[in-house]
Amino acid sequence: MRLVNEELTTEEKAILKDIVKKFEAFDKQRGNLIPILQMVQDNLSYLPSEAVQLVAEYLEINACQVYGVATFYNQFRFHPPGKHPVKVCLGTACHVRAGDIILENFERKLGIVDGETTPDREFSIERVACVGCCALAPVAIIGETVHGHMAPSKVEGLLMRIDIEKDIAKREQEKSEPEQATSDRSGI
């Protein structure tokens, strides 16, 4: 299994410090484990190993006990979501219309499998049970955008569009930076 860069970002380290302060709102009872994990994930979007260890220390239990509970519930993630989360529906309508092939195509193109995030944290893949768009089956959701009537050939085009949009945004930013530097020097 290929893992995302497991090192916390500077922003995540700062959030984690704030989260530790929020632990005090919870009594040190094992019964508070799930609410604490939910609070951590609400703040970080996932449960990094550092956070699991801090929760274990706060509740004075083993980290393996924290992992045992967190892995039991589907709601907890152990990898950060990508900037472009990909969700592929495998509900009945999507499944019978080859949703599994769509998922396999995303996995192949991105080099990761269900539940993983690319090392650059750009993309993550998740299979979902049903997104409620059965008439559009098979369906994939990238970010907040629903893509219906998916075909294996559409996968590469969607990923390419995201790369092109990223390149355009980068060029626009580079174009505006020299203009900003010029206006700063002229005192405008």
Image: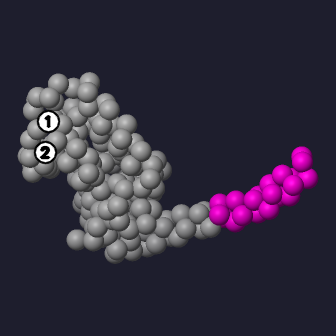
From what the image shows, is residue 9 above or below residue 40? below
Where is residue 130? Give x, y as percent: 28, 47
Residues drawn in magenta: 168-188
Q: Is residue 81 left or right of residue 68?
A: right
Residue 84 is a magenta residue: no
The residue identified by callout 1 is 59
Image quadrant where residue 114 sits = bottom left
In front of the other: label 1 or label 2? 1
- Please report contact status of discs 1 and 2: CB closer than 8 Å, yes or no: yes
Q: Nearer the viewer, residue 105 or 171?
A: 171
Q: Main secondary structure of the magenta part?
A: helix
Residue at x 31% of width, y 48% of height: 46
Image quadrant where residue 163 sits = bottom right
Q: Circle 2 — which element?
A: helix
Q: Circle 1 — which element?
A: helix
Marker disc for residue 66: 2
Q: Residues within 10 Å of mark 2 (few under 14, many from 20)?
A: some
Residue at x 53% of width, y 70% of height: 160
Q: What residue type is disc 2 on?
A: Val
Instruction: Answer whether residue 4 is visible to the viewer in this image.
Output: yes
